Amino acid sequence: MKQWRKWLVIFSSTIIVITLIFIINQLIQLYQNLAMIHPWLGMLVILGLTLALLYVIFITVRGILRLPKEIELADGAEPEEYASYVELSLVKLKHNPTLKEIAFDWEAISHLPEDEQIQLAHQELRQLSILEIKEQAQTVFLSTAISQNGALDSLTVLLILTRMVWRLINHYDKRPTLGKILSIYSNVAATILMARGIEDLDLIEAQMEPLITSILGGSLLSMIPGSVSITNLIANSIVEGSINALLTLRVGIITIDYLGTLKDLDNNYVKRSATLEATKMLGSIIKEGSVNVVQVMMKSVKNAGVQSSRKWNPFTK
C-alpha cells in the first residue's frame, strides 16, 4: 500500500472517531432539551434514535459485505494487466442488477472498445444515481429547514446520508476497497461536522437571495404588521436547509465519482469538482423546497394566530 493510502486511512479513521464523539454529544444535548419537558420523553426519543442509527449502520455494513468485491488494479500494472482488468470489469458490469433492471443495451455498444463500453455503462449508472442524490437532498432540505433543531438535524442528516451512500454503492453492485469505503464515509462524517461552517456558504447565498426575494418580497406577507420577524425566520430556515442539502449533494457526487471509475482519482480534485457540481444542482432543490417551507411556516403562523385569538376572545368558550 502506498504511503498516501496509509495516511488516508489514518485521517479517515480519525474523522469517523471524532464524528462518533460529536454524535454522542448531540444525543446528550437533545436529551437535555427534551428532559425539560419530561425525562421519560427524552429517554424514549434518544433510545429510538440510537436504535434507528444502529439499525441503519448494521444494514449498511451487512449489505456492503454481501456485495461482490471490487476488482483492483495493482500499482504500476503492465499494459497486459490493465487490459485484463478492463475485461474483467466489463464482464462484471454486464451482470450488474441495476443495468439489467433498466435493460441497458449492451448490443448497441458492443462494437466499441471495452473501456468505452464501461464508461457508457458508468454514465447510465451515474444518471440513475443523480436522481437518488437529488431526492435525498430534497428530503434533507425540507427536514432541516422545518426542524431548526441543531442536534436533531445532525442525526437526521447522518441517517439519510448513511442510507443514501449504501443505495449508491448498491447501484454499482460492488464492494469498494477499504480505502474507498473510509474515504466515502469520512466525507459523510465531515459533512456532519462542517454543516455549521461550510466554506461555500457564499455560493448558496448567491443563489438564494433572488429566490427568497421573489418568494417573500412581493407577497402579502410583507403587508402584515410584524412580518419582518416571520420573513427572517423563513429566510433562515431556507439557508439552513440549503447548507445541508448542498453537503448531501456533495457527498453523493463524491461517492459515485469513487465508484464509477477504472482508475484511482485524486482526492482533492474529487472534492473540488463535487462541490462545483453540487452547487449547480442546488438551485432546483432550493426552488422546489422553498415553496413547501413557506407553506408550512405560514400554516403554522396562521394556526398560532387562530389559537391566540380564541384564547383572548371573551366570546369563545
Image: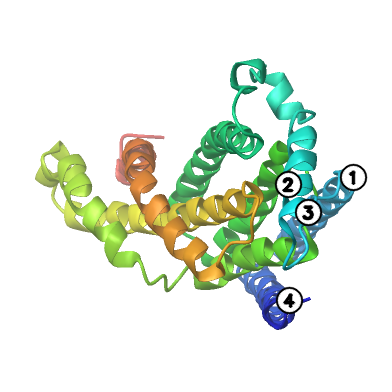
Mark 3 and mark 2: Cα distance apart in space: 5 Å
Residue 50 % position (x, y): 78, 60
Q: How far apart in space, not on screen, are marks 3 and 4 (Cα)?
A: 26 Å
Separation of marks 2 and 1 at Cα, in angstroms: 27 Å
Identify the amino acid type marked 4.
Answer: Val
Q: Is residue 196 left or right of residue 222?
A: right
Q: How many marks?
A: 4
Who comes first in sequence, dot 2 or dot 4?
A: 4
Specify whether residue 34 is in view.
no
The residue at 18%/44% (across/down) is 216
Could you say which disc has been placed on residue 9 in the image?
A: 4
- Secondary structure under badge 4? helix
Q: What residue is disc 1 on?
A: 66
First in residue order: circle 1 vs circle 4: 4
Name the amino acid, label 3: Glu
Residue 243 in view: yes
* Callout 3 secondary element: helix
Residue type indicated by callout 2: Ala
